[in-house]
Amino acid sequence: MGKVAKHINKKEIGGFLKFFLTGTFGAAVNFLSQIPLMDMFLKLGWHDNKAFAWSVFWAYMISTAVSFIPAKLWAFSAKGTGNTRREWLKFFIIASLALGVQEIISILVRNEIANVYFSEYSELLKNKGSHLAGMACSFIANFIGHRFFTFRTTGLYKIIKPESN
């Protein structure tokens, strides 16, 4: 443990804490917006599984949209890079991968754990517990991706969109 602690500096801890706070904001938006979205989809006549999956998807998309600016400006201190378009593209790529993680984990936990082992609990509690499990896994995927890819120069943008002369 001592050797690991020597390699972790205060700047890295501070960066993680800033990302955690930014992520908490996005997670709150994600968590709270899923409830009315699920209700809306159910009122549209969608069956329970479809309404749950799509409400998790759209809640995540809303939180991704509102999380980019705080992540760029504060969590990763990338306000002066001049690469906002590139960073948004990379942010979207990482967010899409993390969305897949959240969807898969949320649905698996709901169907294979919550509905099986906690059937006596309310649907809202099972849904939100499953959603939280997916969000936790997505948070880890987002942190790793954004830390090592999004707000760093990687050369990917030039491959995707070559400069025109």
Image (cartoon, rainbow, N blue to C red):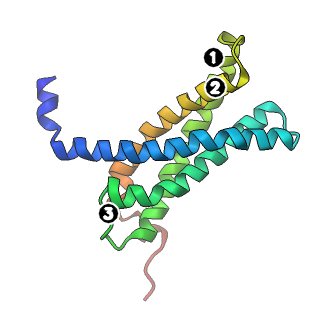
Question: Marks 2/1: CA distance?
Answer: 7 Å
Q: Which amino acid does the dot numbered 3 rest on? A: Ala
Q: SS at mark 3?
A: loop
Q: Earlier in the sequence, mark 3 or mark 2?
A: 3
In 3D space, how far apart are the residues under numbered discs 1 and 3 (Cα atoms)?
40 Å
Which residue lies under the disc numbered 2? 108
Q: Are circles 2 and 1 on residues that touch, CB within 8 Å? A: yes
Q: Residue at x 49, y 63 (%)?
A: 89
Q: Earlier in the sequence, mark 2 or mark 1?
A: 2
**Residue 114 seen in the current view:** yes
Residue 118 horizontal/vertical position (percent): 66, 12
Quadrant of image for the N terminus: top left
Q: How many marks?
A: 3
Tell me the residue at 35%/74% (across/down). 82
Residue 56 appears anywhere in the view: no
Is disc 1 placed on a helix, strand or loop? helix
Residue behind mark 3 = 78
Residue 95: percent from left, percent from top:
51, 50
CA gap, disc 3 to disc 2?
A: 36 Å
Q: Are marks 3 and 2 in contact (CB under 8 Å)?
A: no
Q: Which residue is mark 1?
A: 113
Label 2 packing within 10 angstroms: few (<14), some (14-19), many (20+): some
Q: Residues within 10 Å of mark 3 (few under 14, many from 20)?
A: some
Report the amino acid beneath label 1.
Ile
Residue 66 or residue 162, whichever sits in front: 66
Q: Nearer the viewer, mark 3 or mark 2?
A: 3
Give the answer, above or below, for where 156 lies relative to 53.
Answer: below
**Depicted 21 relative to depicted 4: above or below:** below
Q: Earlier in the sequence, mark 1 or mark 3?
A: 3
